[in-house]
Image (cartoon, rainbow, N blue to C red):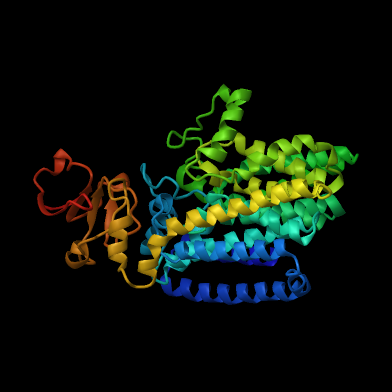
Amino acid sequence: MFTFAILTGIFSYIIFSLGIFGFLYKQILIILSLIYIILSVGILIKNLLNNKNEILHLVQNDKVIILSLSLLILQQLVNLIGALGPELSFDALWYHLTLPKIYLLNHKIFFIPGGLFYYSVMPKFTEMIYAAFISFGSEIYAKLFHFIFGLLTILVIYKIGRLYLPKKLSIIACIIFSSSLAFDWLQITAYVDLIRTFFEVLSFYYLLHFAKNRNVIDLMKSSILTGLAISTKLISVFDLVGINIFLIIFYVKNSYQSKFVTKNLLLYNLVVFLIPLPWFIFSYISTGNPMYPFLTKLYPSGYSWSIFNPLFFIEITWKIFTASPDPLSPIFLIFIPLVFINIKKFKEGKFYLLLLSIIIYFSWYFTPLTGGGRFILPFTGIFSIVCAILIDFYKKQKFETTVLITVVILAIIISIIFRFGANYKYLPVILAKETKVEFLCKNLNLNFGDFYDCANFFKNHIKVKDKVLLIGFHNEYYVDFPFIDQSFLKPSDKFNYIATQNSNLPNKYKNWRIIYQNNVTHVKLYKK
């Protein structure tokens, strides 16, 4: 897995370099993508062959293992239905896919000023790869890429579980993690959260390996992976703080000398920050802020003293598991009390696993609490293993073990049923019984930022030499004509059409005449 992670990092930064120097052309990206895919398949096949004994002996004459694996496979097939359909998710259509598309149109990566694409110079590890995959002509390739990282995260969780647990409970840990609706939903989107989660959970694997074997190479692997996570989603910086706290506690507990501790921590953090450093430099050169738009009015932190209120902590914890727009599995709430009941049973390596999960949870709590369940997925990855360990503590109590495993199985069954209901709408367009135009015009939120040329008017009338000024648009991925958005319009920019969506034409353009109006997409087109 580590080799694959490094290969993916190299792939992303090659595309970043091409974008910086203005060589972001589809033909080049397609060739690079094919090389990356071939090498990735080779690495993953090699990993499977190296672990063939584990795989061959996985399916034993154990009903729980057979049922659990069957449910995991079924769940992935259900999620694959959504991944094969056109993109509908808000952030993907706003910037995860739109920024790569804009970069491709201009053959370079650049800062986009204004109040819409303010994430344009923030670390874009995954979006660089999305630029390569949408070069093939469809966003579905980007969605499948994100889907695969969800599957790989499950495999890493199994791998961590095997450090402490038998096969059956390691699979149960995977089910606990994947039963969250946040995870299932993310697998059908072109977001970045599952890629960030993969890097972080794999980083935790090597961190826990280091705590067990004291091998500094494992620590360096963890630091590289954490750097890749930060390059994927800047919010991972908060988890880096948590990792530093974990390492300090580990070193103090094992009576390491202070000079050694300082040296190792400095080395760890140096390696971490070297990974996203090119993006920080690019952001600083473009905006004067290495972490733009953070620390600006465009992205206020929203911090207040209330975060230190225990009641607020309990309220946020409750909401993230029950009332989030992308909820986590309620299983975690069931197991939290069991942690306190059994806390003395966590010894040696299991203690470090529990410690890490607690620290990472509190690291999330001090982030801007704006992202719902997806922002906390790295925590659920390792806490799922803690939950499986708790089940193992009750192995001598058959009734309690049966109840806990039954609850886990029911949770993933409910998740599968719910997601199949949500993903069913993709089947007609996947099976070619419905066109993409029909599907998108029926399922996009055209009243709140989404756009699609449902009548093909723009396609038939806007030529390559034309330029359209967009006013009131937000999610512009499906805009397939030359455009300038009002948020980054410069005085020198020339345009011969204006399109408005859910907004009025500014007075300074009152001499422009309307030539097209669509009441479904809420779009009006004007010409001077």
In x, y percent, where is residue 516? 13, 55
Q: Please identify the quadrant where the N terminus is shown.
A: bottom right
Image: 27 above or below 425: below
In x, y percent, where is residue 168? 75, 60
Looking at the image, how many numbered discs can be counted on the residues?
0
In x, y percent, where is residue 367? 58, 37
Q: From where the camera sits, is residue 18 visible?
A: no
The answer to which of 350 and 364 lies nearer the viewer is 350
The answer to which of 480 and 427 lies nearer the viewer is 427
Indicate the quadrant where residue 137 lies.
Answer: bottom left
Image: 193 above or below 265: below
| Residue drawn at x 76%, y 43% as measured from the top left | 354
Image: 133 above or below 234: below
Q: From where the camera sits, is residue 455 visible?
A: yes
The answer to which of 73 and 526 lies nearer the viewer is 73
Report the side of 519 relative to 350 (left or right). Answer: left
Indicate the quadrant where residue 510 lies.
Answer: top left
| Residue drawn at x 64%, y 55% as measured from the top left | 175
Report the side of 47 relative to 293 (left or right). Answer: right
In x, y percent, where is residue 202? 69, 56
| Residue drawn at x 85%, y 52% as measured from the top left | 212
Report the side of 470 relative to 275 (left or right). Answer: left
